[in-house]
Image: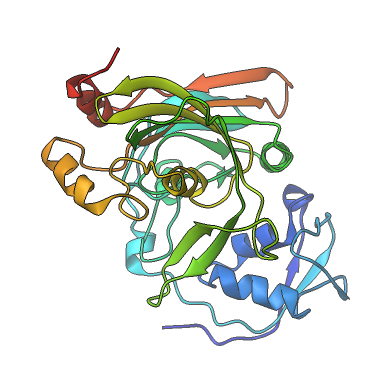
Amino acid sequence: MTTEPAVGWLDVDAESAGQRLDNFLLRHLKGVPKAHVYRIIRSGEVRVNKGRAAADTRVAAGDRVRVPPVRVAERSASAQDAPAREFPILLEDEHLLAIDKPAGVAVHGGSGVSFGVIEQLRRARPGARFIELVHRLDRETSGILLIAKKRSALTHLQDQFRERETGKTYLALVLGEWPERLKVIDVPLRKYLLQDGERRVRVTTKDDPEGMRSISLVKVRERWAGFTLLEVTIKTGRTHQIRVHLAAQGHPIAGDGKYGDFERNKALQKQGLKRMFLHAWRLQFTHPASAQALELHAALPSDLLSFSKHAPKTP
């Protein structure tokens, strides 16, 4: 069931000041596909104070945003009934919340998922005025996830991510012997769609106009029999960046169901690895209010730790 479309007007309040236009619209147009939001911005149908604006335009308090007729799907009962849930807390104050996200939980609803971390947190904290994701993690990836509790904190932290002022390091177990000399992967990535509409990413050439520069720094942490445990620090935050960069080098992540070795994955499941071995282990950033340099760590979760303890190591 859908509501009838009509021209709409959104007024930007002080809490939303400084937010990108695309993020402002995505927050207010719940139920409208993300691709459609970007389409109406590109077409010029969205107006800020009667003028055209780009997706990265920063809205200001008092701005009036015209939204063309869009058909908004009513929230499903499953989305409304997202169970209240708290997650392991690594850090919390009045400005932000850092949690250790378990694998198998989406960060937000959409793409066939009724609800995710953010919806469950909002249900668990009905009195909270503001809870928004600062960044994202793949559903299959565990580890550190930052959430803003104030609009000012969200803007400040997202600026840090965009300007590459944060340090995001993952632990990834790859198949085979990773070459010690390969420490920097600077290879562009390009998104594409499968025939069924599923989003995928592949490496491309530097002259590809649709390619996005993507940089991953790789350090060997441990060598196991038939595997290498890597510390991967991403300097750019592209979709599926680590997964595609490592697989393109001939060393896919163990258990990766999209870019990995499917036959090996079946064997690994029998050996106790039930999901992709990718964990957001360390996050370095500056506190949005105090300007204090922070470094958070999330230990390997029990399932990955159990698999690692039983895997034979090499000297």
Instruction: Report the front residue among 270 and 165.
Output: 270
Q: In percent of the image, x 26 and y 31: which residue is there?
A: 226
Left/right placement of residue 93 relative to residue 17 reads left
View extreme (left): residue: 270
Instruction: Report the front residue among 304 and 175.
Output: 175
Q: Is residue 10 above or below residue 296?
A: below
Q: Is residue 164 above or below residue 300?
A: below
Q: In percent of the image, x 54 and y 63: which residue is there?
A: 191
Left/right placement of residue 199 relative to residue 30 reads left
- Percent x, y of residue 23: 66, 58
Please tell me in which quadrant of the rendered image residue 196 appears: bottom left
Left/right placement of residue 58 relative to residue 96 reads right
- Percent x, y of residue 82: 35, 54
View extreme (top): residue: 315
Classify the position of the N terminus by image quarter.
Answer: bottom left
Classify the position of the C terminus by image quarter.
Answer: top left
Q: In percent of the image, x 27 and y 30: which residue is there?
A: 304
- Percent x, y of residue 270: 11, 41
Please tell me in which quadrant of the rendered image residue 58 appears: bottom right
Instruction: Report the front residue among 214 and 31.
Output: 214
Instruction: Report the front residue among 247 and 84.
Output: 247
Left/right placement of residue 48 relative to residue 87 reads right
